[in-house]
Image (tube, grey):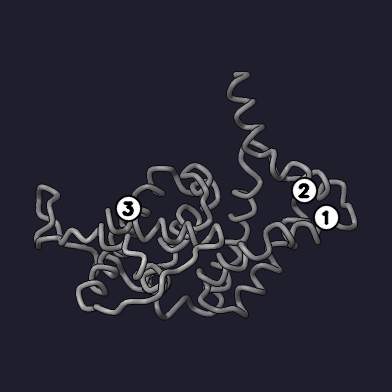
Amino acid sequence: MNASSTSMTTRIDPDGSLVAALRRHDPTAAEDLVAAYGNRAFHLARRITGSAQDAEEAVQDAFLSVTRRIDTFREESAFRSWLYRIVANAAYQRCRNRGGRSTDISLDHLLPVFDEHGRHVTPVADWSMRVDDPARQTELRMVLSTAIEELPGDYRAVVLLRDVQGLSQQETAEALSLTVVNVKTRLHRARLFLRKRLEAHLSVSGRSVPRPTLKTTEQRRTWSLVQAAARA
């Protein structure tokens, strides 16, 4: 029990001071919240809604809800999981208000076809080593970003939280009110779809681009997702 408690405390320690400030209603607490999570929350909301304006409004609604409901936050989960759940819900509400995203597609029509034994019906080219070519990294990250936009919203959110924002499977499940098993399933299916998009691009592209410099954490995580999709 003590080891478990210590692990949980360590997990939420990075936001402990922010949570305390919000609960005290410190004058700068809301500003600190925006500084800590504004960009990441907007990125998540924009990817869900497909609209910068809707994303801005969703984040505003979400952050207002966070400040008002901070006393309902229980530290059984990480603060960022709780925050992302509120942001995602606000973004989904924006989508419902305007009838959803017209670009959402069904993965069932795009995923690879498997036989009764779970094997690919058509041969799958092994191009995983090609994504490590430095000349292709910026190019493939752009292809991946476009492919993520094509994912259905429920799958898009899992990929963004788990692979781009870097949440654990448990945190992603908490943020989206899913089970860990559901997170694993959606993540695997989404990566298969992303792999198919990358594979299609690599089969026709012979272009070379300058070697990129992956400066930010998000850029590095996005590139990790390219590699994960290649090996899905």
- Assess disc 2: are there few (<14), some (14-19) or many (≥20) residues with their C-alpha within 10 Å of its C-alpha: some
Category of crowding for the residue at label 1, using alpha-carbon neighbours closer than 10 angstroms: few (below 14), some (14–19), many (at least 20): some
Mark 2 or mark 3: which comes first in sequence? 2
Residue placed most toward the observer, 201 or 68: 201
Q: Secondary structure at mark 2?
A: helix
Q: Residue 219: x percent and y percent?
A: 50, 63
- For marks 2 and 3, give the CA distance: 34 Å
Q: Amino acid at mark 2?
A: Leu
Q: Which residue is mark 3?
A: 188
* Residue that numbered label 2 is attached to: 18
The amino acid type found where label 3 is placed reads His
Marks 1 and 2 close (CB-CB < 8 Å): yes
Element under disc 3: helix
Image quarter of residue 55: bottom right
Alpha-carbon span between mark 1 and mark 2 = 7 Å
Looking at the image, is 133 positioned above or below residue 162? below
> To which residue does mark 1 refer?
29
